Image: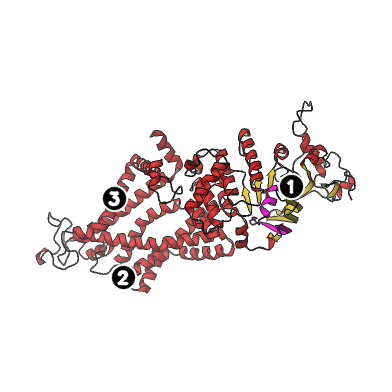
Amino acid sequence: MKKILEVEDLRVYFYTYNGVVRAVDGVSFEVYEGEAMCIVGETGCGKSVTARAITKMIRPPGRIVSGKVLFNGIDIMKLREDELSKIRGQDITYIYQDPSAALDPLYTAGYHVAETITSHNKWIKIREALKRAIELFREILIPDPEARIKSYPHELSGGMKQRVVIATAVSNFPKLIIADEPTTALDVTIQAQILDLLKELRRKYNSSILMITHNLGIVAEVCDRVMVMYAGKVVEKAYTERLFENPFHPYTRGLLNAVPNPYKKVTRLETIPGSVPDMINIPEGCRFRPRCPYATNRCFKEPDLVEVEDNHYASCWLTPGCK
Amino acid sequence: MTQGWKNHKILGISRPISQFINEWKLIFAVIRKSPITTIGLAIVMGFVILGIVGPYITPYDPMTIGVTGTLKRLHPPCLEHPFGTDEYGRDLFSRVLYGARISLIAALCVMALAVPIGIVLGLVSGYYGGIIDEIIMRVTDIFLSFPGLVLAIAFSASLGAGLTSAIIALAAVWWPGYVRVIRAQVLVVKEMLFVEAAKAIGVKTSRILFRHILPNSITPLLVLITFDFGSVILATSALSFIGLGAQPPIPEWGRLIADGRKWFPEKWWYSFFPGLAILVTVLGFNLLGDGIRDVMDPRYRRSIEIKG
């Protein structure tokens, strides 16, 4: 399979008044064509920053310190701002967590879609773009699309707004859709609809999806492969099924145990003790050490990400073959 | 909904006409609730209408000397000349009426020059930040560190007396305020997710600035402009009063007050009526400005909507 996105040793640091926050610290991964990849992790582990760094959407005080992002063979990090804006919205698009904030309150739903189309296809008239918006709305199951393109964001429900955001994201048939917690702001029934829609669109347009979530249910539902992040580092990366069947990293195990399992009779769900480390004073060695039930003295040295089995990587001293 | 829709040029972008009508109905409902704003609106509308049609409805020619006959010099207010006459026998009512147009033109021109400068510099300064912001803000600080009117007098004097130079001088000292207001709004709006979302779909920076950030930050500026209309009229009159603005025989209000000083207080009507015109006009704009601020405040609007 062809790699559509390749991220190598990405480091994004935030130079704040209190010190340097190493939000993303040496993350490497790849997304294959037509695949759905997931990044899972707690709040503040660097998932969203990773996603934004892919098209250099990091604003001061943040800075991309090092790393290489290859998209279809193009090195994104070397592109100028105007070249980047040709890729954004055309080849790589974003779906945001909060659809009510992602839509400009002064413009109609149709305008948002039309703007995306006309920004990348100068020859398309706004009237034609709006016709395409109607078709897109019909495709993503917005009822009464002719009327809805004239609706303002405040006139739409949360689920409808997220559909509009998705319509803008897919309007130019992108190769990669980056969905940053697309269902977090929605209620559960709408969540399922939106996930079905994303799966459907992925099949139809053969787009790859990079999904960012903290919900393991969504991972199991949508994704082919998962990457687990903790405090700016990748701790485990595997095919979804393998990860759920055979997690190696204690953090991944902790996450999986914290989710109710209908096949196991438990009286009380497990939790991971402690909380995410202060990103300015990151613990020495393995970053999960202070919370890890299996921590030993060798954990004061940082473990490498090693391939434990075919396409299954983990970064823990307990995994076989770790140096 | 579908009816107003047909009247619209571009499909789906702008709201249907009926929604606009509702919006205006609401605005008028809010204005009607407050008698003070209603007075302000009435004064401002009266001023604008007189500014447009004033010169066509003057009972006497405001410029020509001796139109009312040489015997009627400095005639006190009477039925024929409600504001009296001046030392050249001109009808003061006609002159004050004509003056409305001068004030209206001056205020519009100053705004037309100062507002675009303020908007562009404020947008650039707020959006880009860094060294550009620093330079623009320090320059505006320099302008704001002088009393505006004193600076305007200096500019106007160096450009030579006349209405045009007064307008340029006032515009030159008026833009820094707008830069500040727009910049402060841009700093808030640019952090909103839809700006990042627009960037993420590849919208060009100039378009983000003018189509997304500006419309979302313009509200406080509209209120400020309404207030400033009054202030600019006052400032133009002040410049004319000290002889820098409009030159005779143009009947600028400030100029009329200055001319009447010689005869004050015996021929009180000469300075009194132009002064009253300035007072009423500026008051009208200030009252309307207050009202517009209420209309723009969603909490206040909501309470009206619930009652309505």
The picture places residue A73, in percent across and down from the top left corner, at 71, 59
Indicate the chain on which mark 3 is placed: B
In the rendered structure, the answer to whether residue B195 lies left or right of residue B22 reads right
Residue type highlighted by circle 1:
Asp
The picture places residue A301, in percent across and down from the top left corner, at 86, 50
Q: CA distance from mark 2 to mark 3?
A: 28 Å
Q: Residue at x 24, y 67 (%)?
A: B250
Residue placed under numbered mark 1 in the picture: A278
Q: Is residue A55 magenta?
A: yes
In the rendered structure, the answer to whether residue A147 lies left or right of residue A13 reads left
In the rendered view, tell whether residue A226 sits above or below residue A89.
above
Query: On the rendered image, what quadrant is the N terminus of chain B found in?
Result: top left
- The crowd level at tag 1 (other Cα within 10 Å; few <14, some 14-19, many 20+) is few
**Element type where label 2 sits in the image:** loop
Specify the segment rendered in magenta. Answer: A47-71
Residue placed under numbered mark 2 in the picture: B162
Indicate the chain on which mark 1 is placed: A
First in sequence: mark 2 or mark 3?
3
Residue type highlighted by circle 3:
Ile
- The crowd level at tag 3 (other Cα within 10 Å; few <14, some 14-19, many 20+) is many
Tag of residue B15: none
The picture places residue A30, in percent across and down from the top left corner, at 75, 52
**From this viewpoint, which residue is outermost toward the front?**
A204
Residue B161 vs residue A284, the one in the foreground: A284
Q: CA distance from mark 3 to mark 1?
A: 61 Å
Residue A183 vs residue B92, the one in the foreground: A183
Q: Are marks 3 and 1 in contact (CB under 8 Å)?
A: no
Q: CA distance from mark 1 to mark 2?
A: 66 Å
Residue type highlighted by circle 2:
Gly
Residue placed under numbered mark 3 in the picture: B43
The picture places residue A193, in percent across and down from the top left corner, at 62, 36
